[in-house]
């Protein structure tokens, strides 16, 4: 039953990502962590994310902003991720879950505030602040494969078209999650869950197809607000678990 529920969470998360570009890993991990330990589900979800991020990277490759990627996001995210991987072995599972839950609640609450308050204008960060926050985002990605919330915050004020932003971040997740997958292969955590990954591949493919179909048929603004409310609830449940 637990694995079926995780499969439903994966389908929902990847559908949402394909439809409105909202991070599939954050959603799937937030729901999945209510069912299973993070150390169990990360080696399953991270390889699956490569399918979607790789597809989006290829599809929107002409929109990738290489200057931002190579000068700011890439170096600081990679270094931060390596630090996060090292620290992850030193932090108990309970504390990891609480930290993840806190980040999910903060991100969902802040995003809802910006979504509902039309007068809210987040201040752009200075270059140094952007780099420090990007490094911190890398750490959270190494800890629980969810650098998205902090990275989105780090890039506040960076002028990009929506498609450019999505394409650039898709490349980031494709590269980082490919690296994490190799890390899981090295420490044999992926081998332990390889059968689950294979089971869920058709689920992810179906979710991508459905999400692309949904993309042209739903109000992105309303859909995003509903997703954020559900994410906020999941984060609170993680803190209370």
Image: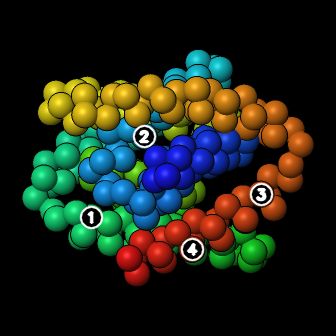
Mark 2: secondary structure: helix
Residue tagged 2: 45
Mark 3: secondary structure: helix
User: Percent x, y for residue 1?
Assistant: 49, 52
Indicate left or right for 61 with 102 as reference: right
Indicate left or right for 130 with 97 as reference: right
User: Badges 2 and 4: C-beta atoms under 8 Å apart?
Assistant: no
* Residue in the image at 75% along x and 74% along y: 116
Mark 4: secondary structure: helix
* Residue in the image at 86% along x and 38% along y: 216
Q: Quadrant of residue 119?
A: bottom right
Calculate the distance from the C-alpha at mark 4 to the C-alpha at mark 3: 16 Å
Evaluate whether residue 177 shows in this view. Answer: yes
Calculate the distance from the C-alpha at mark 3 to the C-alpha at mark 1: 29 Å
Mark 2, other Cα within 10 Å: few <14 / some 14–19 / many ≥20: many
Q: Quick one: label 2 or label 4, which is nearer the N terminus?
A: 2
User: Badges 2 and 1: C-beta atoms under 8 Å apart?
Assistant: no
Q: Quick one: label 3 or label 1, which is nearer the N terminus?
A: 1
User: Badges 1 and 4: C-beta atoms under 8 Å apart?
Assistant: no
Q: Quadrant of residue 108?
A: bottom right
Evaluate whether residue 149 shows in this view. Answer: no
**Which is more toward the observer, 73 or 173?**
173
Residue tagged 4: 233
* Residue in the image at 61% along x and 42% along y: 11
**Which is more toward the observer, 55 or 123?**
55
User: Percent x, y for residue 32?
Assistant: 45, 55
Calculate the distance from the C-alpha at mark 2 to the C-alpha at mark 1: 17 Å
Residue tagged 3: 223
């Amino acid at each position: 039953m637990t694995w079926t529920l995780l499969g439903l969470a994966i389908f929902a998360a990847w559908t949402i990502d394909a439809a409105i570009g909202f991070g599939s890993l954050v959603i799937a991990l937030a729901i999945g962590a209510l069912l299973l330990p993070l150390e169990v589900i990360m080696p399953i979800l991270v390889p699956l994310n490569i399918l979607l991020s790789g597809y989006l990277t290829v599809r929107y490759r002409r929109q990738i902003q290489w200057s931002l990627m190579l000068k700011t996001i890439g170096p600081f995210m990679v270094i931060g991720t390596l630090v996060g991987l090292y620290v992850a072995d030193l932090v108990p599972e309970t504390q990891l879950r609480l930290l993840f839950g806190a980040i999910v609640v903060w991100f969902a609450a802040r995003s809802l505030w910006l979504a509902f308050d039309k007068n809210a204008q987040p201040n752009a960060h200075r270059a140094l602040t952007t780099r420090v926050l990007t490094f911190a985002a890398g750490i959270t990605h190494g800890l629980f494969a969810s650098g998205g919330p902090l990275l989105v915050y780090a890039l506040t004020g960076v002028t990009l078209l929506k498609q450019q932003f999505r394409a650039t971040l898709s490349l980031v997740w494709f590269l980082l999650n490919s690296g994490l997958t190799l890390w899981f292969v090295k420490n044999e955590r992926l081998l332990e869950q390889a059968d689950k990954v294979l089971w869920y591949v058709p689920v992810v493919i179906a979710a991508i197809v459905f999400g692309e179909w949904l993309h042209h048929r739903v109000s992105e603004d309303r859909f995003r607000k509903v997703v954020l409310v559900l994410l906020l609830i999941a984060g609170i449940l993680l803190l209370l678990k």
